[in-house]
Image (cartoon, coloured by chain):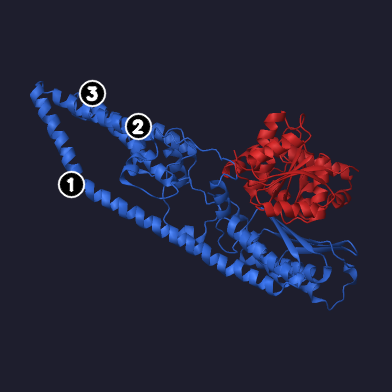
Chain colours: A blue, B red
Amino acid sequence: MSQTPSPAAALAPRRAYRSGTDRWLGGVASGLAEHLGLPLLWVRLGFVALVAFGGFGVVLYGALWMFLPADRQLTPVSPGLDAATRQGKRGGRPQRRLTDFGPLVAVGAIAVGVLLFLTLATGRTLSYGPLLLAGAGVAVLWWQADEAQRARWRDPSGRMGPLRAIVGGGGWRAWLRIVAGLMLLIAAIVLFSLRSGSLTVALNVGLAAAFGIVGLGFMVGPWLLRLSYDLSEEREARVRSEERADVAAHLHDSVLQTLALIQRSADDPATVNRLARAQERDLRSWLFDADEEGPTTLAAALRAVAAEVEDAHPVHVEVVCVGDAPVTEEDRPLVLAAREAIGNAARHSGAGTVDVYAEATPTGVEIFVRDRGTGFDPTRVAEDRQGLRSSIIGRMERHGGSASVRSIPGEGTEVRLSLPNRTTTQETP
Amino acid sequence: MTRRTVVIVDDHAMFRTGVRAELGGSVDVVAEAADVDEAVRAVLEHQPEVVLLDVHLPGGGGAEVMRRCGLAHGPATSGSPTRFLALSVSDAAEDVIGTIRAGARGYVTKTITGPELVAAIERVAGGDAVFSPRLAGFVLDAFAGTIEVAAVDEDLDRLTEREREVMRLIARGYSYKEVGAELFISIKTVETHMSSVLRKLQLSSRHELTRWASDRRLL
């Protein structure tokens, strides 16, 4: 991640995840590479190299596979896009097949590793059969748990009955996995107990194991059941009421008030226009902007400036940004100069639209403010007109940038602001 | 000049009525549709010159309409004379670029004025691309970091320096005519550059664009 972390992200502890997108086996290597900030190839080679040490690489990989949580793959999407996707208005984005053979391979690998280790350590050959069977059984059950967890994440309702918590949304596949896993476990127990030779002993051991499991289930089961019901109901109710409160508050605060204002000033087209524009901007940012964290970036700062001008003057300010950069103290003059230029265009040009284009590159930032209004002759601007001379050109030059104005009477004006990037250390992707 | 035939596809009846009224007598609105199935039927039946297509549409979105019309006709370039102009209230980058990649010849937001919309329809019907400043900005973003003039000839997937200049001027709010005057080229040349950018955007498998698109789950 080369981006500057936002303050909120910096405070939260960094956690490692298994990568869900870039993976060969379980995404352990790529998840680890991202977490440690190492090249992916190194991490993969590291695992391979560690295999040479008594299979330690395999064991480590398997253990990480089990203990690292899977990456949630939840990219923050704006509410408007999210809703449109849910209602099938945006076309199906490709659903990733959630096949994860991870735990299966992982547990198998660990089992093999442990067996190898034991064999080497004790010098005795253990019976591999039952252990492998048991390992496979646990792996299949684990796999199902993984699938069920993913199903819960995807479940929009958030309802999570105890059955659903185990089975997930997998249908017959899920049941097949559970039954297969249990069968493998039982077979392992039976096989293990058969090694003593006598069938009665085997039966007794098997029965004892079965009773143990069932007894444990009886003890813990009801408690788990109640806990999961309580949790899911509470979560569901809370989410629903919070969402409703948010939507209601927003609609009330903004849309209703604007409608009331529009009705009151129905005979004043300019005001109606301004109100509608402000409301549109507000709703649009609410619906289509994924969580933007304050005007800390150039694009956000320019949009805020444009909104101020739109509120004060009957113009539409179209802001287009290419690339983006965090706004530092050194960039403030640039934003202020842009604001002055946009304000000038809104006040003097008489044009209905002002186009603002900003481009942030590693070498610097350029902003163009253009209108198609009356224009003027830049050489004949009176000395006492402070706006252009000192607030724009002077300000930019004082701070190491430059500004130029091109204006043709009758065709409009374009102000170009540029500020080279002096903090070159910032750009280390 | 004959009036262009147009089909309006949008799931809000009020908006369709509004657009129809705004277009007035300048174009011939032959049909309206409110979802993907209706839209495909209307387009195949009326064979309009231009389809004004909403991006968010019940039944799979505007991209689905273009896909199914394309299937019925073969490649959009040869078979059907119908061209799509996307018209949407959403100006999220992934919607805009996704729609262009699905085959639209242009993208304008619903706040566009009547005369501008008529001009855009005319341009799309003539086979040209329509880029709003915002779309031009997204295109530059998508192709970001691909400015190496020396390597242009080997790699058809990147924007040429000239195409980038044209895109930047469009993003700065210049009209085609003004772009031509600024760069000392004819409007026809500007249009050629725009079409070639559009083609690159639709066909490109270039690394940056692919990564940009896959970051936004467009692939």
| Picture residue at 12% right of the left edge, 27% below the top | A203
| Residue ID for mark 2 | A104
Q: How many marks?
A: 3
| Picture residue at 52% right of the left edge, 67% below the top | A249
Nearer to the camera, B129 or B57: B57
Nearer to the camera, B187 or A163: A163
Query: Separation of disc 3 and disc 2 at Cα?
Result: 17 Å
Characterize the local packing of mark 1: few (<14), some (14-19) or many (20 or more) Cα atoms within 10 angstroms: few
Left or right: A273 with respect to A117? right
Q: Position of residue A62 (x, y in %)?
A: 34, 36
Q: Secondary structure at mark 1?
A: helix
| Residue ID for mark 1 | A219
**What is the three-letter code of the residue carrying label 3?**
Gly
Label 1: chain? A
**What is the three-letter code of the residue carrying label 2?**
Leu
Q: Secondary structure at mark 3?
A: helix
Circle on res. A428: none
Q: Position of residue A91 (x, y in %)?
A: 59, 41
Q: Can see residue A50? A: no
Characterize the local packing of mark 2: few (<14), some (14-19) or many (20 or more) Cα atoms within 10 angstroms: many
Q: Name the front one of labels 1 and 3.
A: 1
Q: Can see residue B67? A: yes
**Residue extending furthest top?**
A197
| Residue ID for mark 3 | A129
Label 3: chain? A
**What is the three-letter code of the residue carrying label 1?**
Met
